[in-house]
Image (tube, helix red, strand yellow):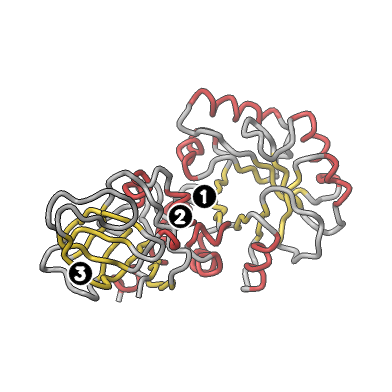
């Protein structure tokens, strides 16, 4: 049976490494980028100061699963009855009308993403109101392109113009901006993709494996999969049990699976299966790695014309998820 395997020890290792130099808010929205929000939250709880999600439903999933640390909801969330550790975000002075006494609020500042966030002229009003109510949890913004030094400097300048109380938590840098925190020293970062190993030097946690359902010979001049293309040489092919319904998108670019100790070129992708080159060493039932130690997230996402963010959140969505812990195995 095809399955998605999550190395929870790798995620814990990544969280521990980040936490060595700065306080960490773990981003576990979109089911922890496809890794399982509650499983991830419980595994790294000791290495974070809080969590971040995209919706009230995601926050409540963590609360109902026993998470006690603060949970920030990104974007706009209408007022609702929630646990004390759930933190809504405000981006507009009009949202102050929905403030409920006793809750804490995070303020999002717009410094260039133009997605959510209050402009600096509006932010002061929101911050002052919440400070007076002793309800200001934190103030944050989002970097557009941390690799662009000039652009990032401008965003930090805009953020620092906002009058934020000295004792208020501030967080600007996310995974790709971790190096920025060494310079600006806000003390807290929000990380998602780094936790899951989608960027170096962090450990990739997700692997996806399928199985060979049959092996057949296809003669030159015949097709493989949909379309009118034909192969030029007699070829053995293996039909595996992962397809585009599982998020393994179609593409014209070359890509590979690791099967029988070799990298094998993908010939066709159908809804429920993928057909790859094979040889006489490949047998029905053999395991095929689509993503893992031999096929990295960066390699596969490039072949799919996307990135690790989209790959993690979509690939394997219909598959059984199996958790294991390399750190426990290595220490055992």
Residue toward you, 140 or 185 = 140
Question: Which label sits in the foreground, 3 or 2?
Answer: 3
Residue toward you, 110 or 135 = 110
Residue 195 marker: 2
Q: Quadrant of residue 326?
A: bottom left
Q: Earlier in the sequence, mark 1 or mark 3?
A: 1
State the SS at label 2: loop
For residue 193, side relative to residue 171 (left or right): left
Instruction: Read off the residue under disc 1.
Output: 191
Q: Residue at x 48, y 37 (%)?
A: 182
Q: Residue 266, position in %: x, y?
A: 26, 54
Q: Quadrant of residue 107?
A: top right
Image quadrant holding the N terminus, namely bottom left
Question: Callout 1: few (<14), some (14-19), or many (20+) C-alpha neighbours within 10 Å?
Answer: many
Residue 73 marker: none
Query: Do callouts 1 and 2 mark residues in contact (Cβ within 8 Å)?
Result: yes
Residue toward you, 1 or 206 = 1
Residue 215 marker: 3
| Mark pair 3, 2: CA separation | 38 Å
């Amino acid at each position: 049976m095809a399955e998605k395997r999550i190395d929870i020890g790798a995620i814990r290792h990544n969280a521990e490494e980040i936490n060595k130099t700065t306080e960490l808010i773990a981003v576990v929205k979109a089911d922890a980028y496809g890794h399982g929000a509650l499983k991830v939250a419980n595994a790294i709880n000791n290495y974070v100061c809080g969590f971040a999600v995209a919706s009230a439903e995601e926050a409540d999933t963590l609360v109902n699963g026993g998470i006690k640390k603060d949970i920030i909801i990104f974007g706009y969330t209408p007022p609702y009855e929630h646990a004390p550790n759930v933190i809504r975000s405000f981006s507009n002075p009009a949202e102050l009308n929905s403030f409920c006494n006793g809750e804490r609020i995070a303020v999002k500042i717009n410094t260039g993403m133009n997605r959510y966030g209050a402009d600096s002229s509006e932010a002061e009003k929101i911050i002052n109101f919440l400070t007076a109510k002793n309800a200001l949890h934190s103030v944050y913004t989002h970097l557009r392109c941390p690799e662009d030094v000039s652009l990032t400097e401008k965003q930090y300048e805009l953020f620092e113009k906002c009058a934020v109380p000295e004792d208020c938590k501030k967080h600007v840098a996310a995974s790709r901006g971790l190096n920025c925190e060494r310079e600006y020293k806000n003390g807290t970062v929000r990380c998602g993709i780094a936790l899951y190993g989608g960027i170096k030097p962090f450990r990739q946690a997700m692997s996806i494996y399928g199985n060979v359902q049959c092996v057949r010979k296809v003669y030159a001049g015949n097709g493989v999969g949909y379309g009118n293309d034909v192969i030029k040489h007699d070829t053995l092919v293996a039909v595996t049990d992962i397809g585009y319904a599982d998020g393994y998108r179609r593409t014209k670019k070359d890509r590979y699976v690791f099967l029988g100790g070799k990298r094998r070129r993908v010939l066709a992708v159908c809804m429920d299966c993928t057909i790859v080159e094979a040889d006489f060493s490949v047998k029905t039932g053999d395991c095929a790695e689509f993503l893992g130690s031999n096929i990295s997230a960066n390699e596969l996402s490039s072949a799919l014309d996307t990135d690790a963010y989209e790959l993690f959140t979509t690939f394997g969505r219909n598959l059984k998820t199996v958790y294991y812990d390399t750190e426990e195995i290595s220490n055992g």
